[in-house]
Amino acid sequence: MVRQIEGIICAVRHHGENGAIVRLLTPNHGLISGYVRGARSRINRPILICGNNVAAEMRQRTPGQLAGMTIELVTSRAPLLGEPLASAAIEWSTALVAATLPEDQPHADVYAALSGLLMAVDAAPSARRWAGAVIGFERLMLFALGYGGDSILNAEDWPTVLAGLNENEKRLGRHLLSDRRAALLPARERLVDRLKRAVA
């Protein structure tokens, strides 16, 4: 079976000498995984970056087998890796999706929200324009996974943003990260620390 899909890279785990298992969030199929050969090649290294939008061809011989994946870059966010705030936002949002969303279950709302957040981070030089969207995205993830959620009202009000981040941390730790805190919270702590320094 061959499928042509587009998605956002949310996780890359190197496998063997040259390959990697790549997890994509797609608009119609949810989170899916595939094996990319030559992941460390000069061509694939700049593509296999979390937050990048890619077009992928998935080849699978039998259901349940890990599909082979070949990828082409659609939108690169590699230039943002040199920006501490932007890179922290991308790292945290994609890691949250990869660690908590079940595979092969459509979540068009999560895809749209992550895509919107990444575009906002890409477009705005100041975190003031997208910090509230991080809070909204975290709350959408809680809602999508069955733990309720609401949205922030004033995305550019820093006291409200910081209060929202604190409130989300409690709910995320209680519901989504209870058994993954050690692996995931450092990424969120980096983002929150950088946001706090940005407004100090």
Image (cartoon, rainbow, N blue to C red):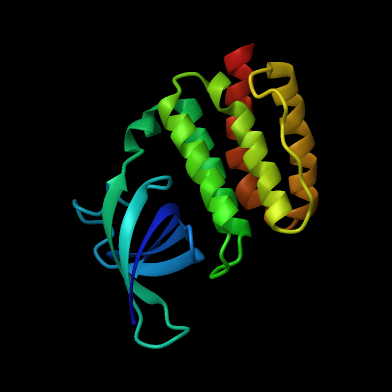
Query: At 41% across and 77% down in the image, what residue appears?
Result: 66
Query: At 74% across and 22% down in the image, what residue appears?
Result: 160
Residue 97 is at least partly visible in this image: no
Q: Residue furthest left?
A: 42
Q: Position of residue 155 (x, y in %)?
A: 65, 24
Q: Residue furthest top?
A: 200
Q: How many marks?
A: 0
Q: Quadrant of the N terminus?
A: bottom left
Where residue 190 sits, quadrant-wise, is top right
Q: Quadrant of the C terminus?
A: top right
Q: Is residue 100 left or right of residue 60?
A: right
Q: Position of residue 195 (x, y in %)?
A: 60, 23
Query: At 52% across and 37% down in the image, what residue appears?
Result: 117
Q: Is residue 65 left or right of residue 196?
A: left
Q: Residue furthest bottom?
A: 62
- Closer to us: 3 or 199: 3
Query: At 37% across and 46% down in the image, what residue appears?
Result: 52
Q: Position of residue 87 (x, y in %)?
A: 46, 34
Residue 180 is at least partly visible in this image: yes
- Above-or-below relation of 76 to 66: above
Where residue 59 sits, quadrant-wise, is bottom left
Q: Position of residue 38 (x, y in %)?
A: 24, 63
